[in-house]
Amino acid sequence: MKKNTYSTRKIAFLGLMLGIIIVLLHVERMLPPFPFFPPNFKLGLSNIIVMFAIFFVGVKDAFTLGILKAFFNMLMRGYVGGILSLTGGMLSITIISLFSFIFKKRISLVALSILGALSHNIGQLVMASFLLNSPYLFMAFLPYLMIAGVILGTFTGISANTIMPIFKRIYVK
């Protein structure tokens, strides 16, 4: 008999991770707007869970969580919010996975989180510029989003450093 690659435990754990992502998305929506940041700017707390998935569950499952996260974002924020979440999330997961593979243990979670935040913002800006057919949008928002990506990527990375050991203990292969 062929062994199923997805055990019941893994499916349940991924469901739990998706639930945490959805809760964090709701929490971020309840926060007041950040001064000096573009409208609808979010902290990216749910990206901690996606980073955990990249390192401990696998890149394939991280992409699955990213797609499901975008779907729930679409339900909460509409089609455009879902598309922006999808493009930013997929680019972010790709960049984090690539850099963590290339640099193995020589790159910190904070650095990976900053790279993920920057690539997420770039992916969203490219898609928004495409949807609005305006390259000026990209040029206008890029400096703000790069600064915000570094600041909030650092915050998310520090949070991930704090939370990751807890998730390691909870996750059992």
Image: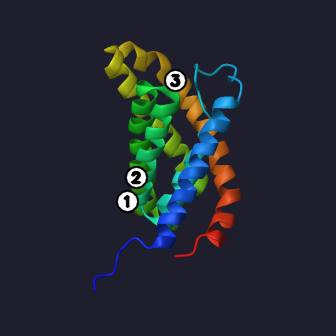
> Element at badge 2?
helix
Q: Give the vertical position of 131 relative to 150 (above or below).
A: above
Q: Give the vertical position of 15 relative to 128 (above or below).
A: below
Q: Residue furthest left?
A: 1
Q: Residues within 10 Å of mark 2 (few under 14, many from 20)?
A: many
Q: Quadrant of residue 152?
A: top right
Q: Residue under label 1, please give it.
A: 60
Question: Where does the N terminus fall, quadrant-wise?
Answer: bottom left
> Element at badge 1?
helix
Q: Residues within 10 Å of mark 3 (few under 14, many from 20)?
A: few
User: Which of the two discs, 2 and 3, labels the residue nearer the N terminus?
Assistant: 2
Three-letter residue code for mark 3 = Pro
Three-letter residue code for mark 2 = Phe
Q: Give the vertical position of 47 relative to 128 (above or below).
A: below
Q: Residue under label 3, please give it.
A: 143
Cα separation, mark 2 vs mark 1, equals 5 Å
In front of the other: 109 or 132: 132
| Lateral position of residue 30 relative to residue 134, left or right | right
Residue 15, percent from left and from top: 52, 58
Badge number at residue 63: 2
